[in-house]
């Protein structure tokens, strides 16, 4: 496990050391209007404290900050964070180098946590831990907002997106995009509230809510009386 993790950390740092030179121009600038839509989708309340995990060069963090919220952006890559810091003109936004699997914040510190275009860059064990950490640092009933790739429903679209992205993304992309991502969120204590397919199905925008209490997590995971199945089948969309 340790060897695999070490390999992942050095691979990701090296990958984003190279990408840090052009990421802002190739991704942040063209996607800035989309980031604003993600902010609208997040249901942020006045005075909210927001964490953007794996923030990269800060594209989504800037979109939250320009609306006046208090924002922290963290990323594993010193090179990406260096670019984000250089671009930052907001007093209500700060960037830090930090690992998503070990967030340097106390429990329930943030109202909202987001992660955009980053879970597909993590192997499953790291991804699970990162989502668990987001739940831990987010207040009960706070929102978790996720943007990532998905595969279109139709076979041709799915084939094209899969192979195109596989050629350009990190080696963790194929496993991520085929995985049961929603199951991972539910297992981590997130109730999915809204889910939108974007980019003709090649992307997903998802908003979940952390449970109010540990009892609620247990209750949701248990089979409903007389159902013979799990509460994941419930009409509230908990599956
Ligand atoms: C494709 S970039 C996405 C950046 C940004 N969130 C966006 O929407 O453009 C993926 C980012 O995830 C970061 N990352 C990968 N694993 C991480 C981890 N364990 N902890 C923190 N950041 C991580 C990478 O360093 C990289 O900056």
Image: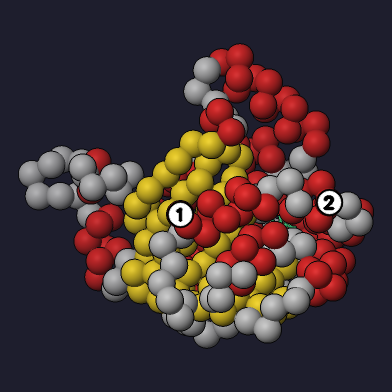
What is the quadrant of residue 202 in the picture? top right
How far apart marks 2 and 1 lie (CA) works out to 24 Å
Q: Residues within 10 Å of mark 2 (few under 14, many from 20)?
A: few
Position of residue 193 relative to residue 162, above or below, is below
Label 2 sits on a secondary structure element that is helix
Q: x and y percent of residue 111 in the render?
A: 45, 74
- Quadrant hosting ligand 1: bottom right
**In the image: residue 155, left or right of residue 87:** left
Q: Residue furthest top?
A: 156
Q: x and y percent of residue 138 in the render?
A: 46, 73
- Residue denoted by label 2: 25
Q: x and y percent of residue 219 in the render?
A: 22, 61
What is the quadrant of residue 166 in the picture? top right
Q: Are marks 2 and 1 in contact (CB under 8 Å)?
A: no
Residue at position x 67%, y 27% in the image: 162
Residue at position x 60%, y 76% in the image: 71
- Residue denoted by label 1: 41
Q: Residues within 10 Å of mark 1 (few under 14, many from 20)?
A: some
Question: In which quadrant will I find the N terminus?
Answer: bottom right
Q: Residue furthest left?
A: 226
Q: x and y percent of residue 225 in the render?
A: 9, 50
Tag 1 or tag 2, which sits nearer the N-term?
2
Count the marks: how many?
A: 2
Label 1 sits on a secondary structure element that is helix
Residue at position x 84%, y 67% in the image: 83
**In the image: residue 144, left or right of residue 214:** right
Q: Is residue 218 visible?
A: yes
- The one nearer the camera, 59 or 172, is 59
Position of residue 112 relative to residue 146, above or below, is below
- The one nearer the camera, 13 or 62, is 62
């Amino acid at each position: 496990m340790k060897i695999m993790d070490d390999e992942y950390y050095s691979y990701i740092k090296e990958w984003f050391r190279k990408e840090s030179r052009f990421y802002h121009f190739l991704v942040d600038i063209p996607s800035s209007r989309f980031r604003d839509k993600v902010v609208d989708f997040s249901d942020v309340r006045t005075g909210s404290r927001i964490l953007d995990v794996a923030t990269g060069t800060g594209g989504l963090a800037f979109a939250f900050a320009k609306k006046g919220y208090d924002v922290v952006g963290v990323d594993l890559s010193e090179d990406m964070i260096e670019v984000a810091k250089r671009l930052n003109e907001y007093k209500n936004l700060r960037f830090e180098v930090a690992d998503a699997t070990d967030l340097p914040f106390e429990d329930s510190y943030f109202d909202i946590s987001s992660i955009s275009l980053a879970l597909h860059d993590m192997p499953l064990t790291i991804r699970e831990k990162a989502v668990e950490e987001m739940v831990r640092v987010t207040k009960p009933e706070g929102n978790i907002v996720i943007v990532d790739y998905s595969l279109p429903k139709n076979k041709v679209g799915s084939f094209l997106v899969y192979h195109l992205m596989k050629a350009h993304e990190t080696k963790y992309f194929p496993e991520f995009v085929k995985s049961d991502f929603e199951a991972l969120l539910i297992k981590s204590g997130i109730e999915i509230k809204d889910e939108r397919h974007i980019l003709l199905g090649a992307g997903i925008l998802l908003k979940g809510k952390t449970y109010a209490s540990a009892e609620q997590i247990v209750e949701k995971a248990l089979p409903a009386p007389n159902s013979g199945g799990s509460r994941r089948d419930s009409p509230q969309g908990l599956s």
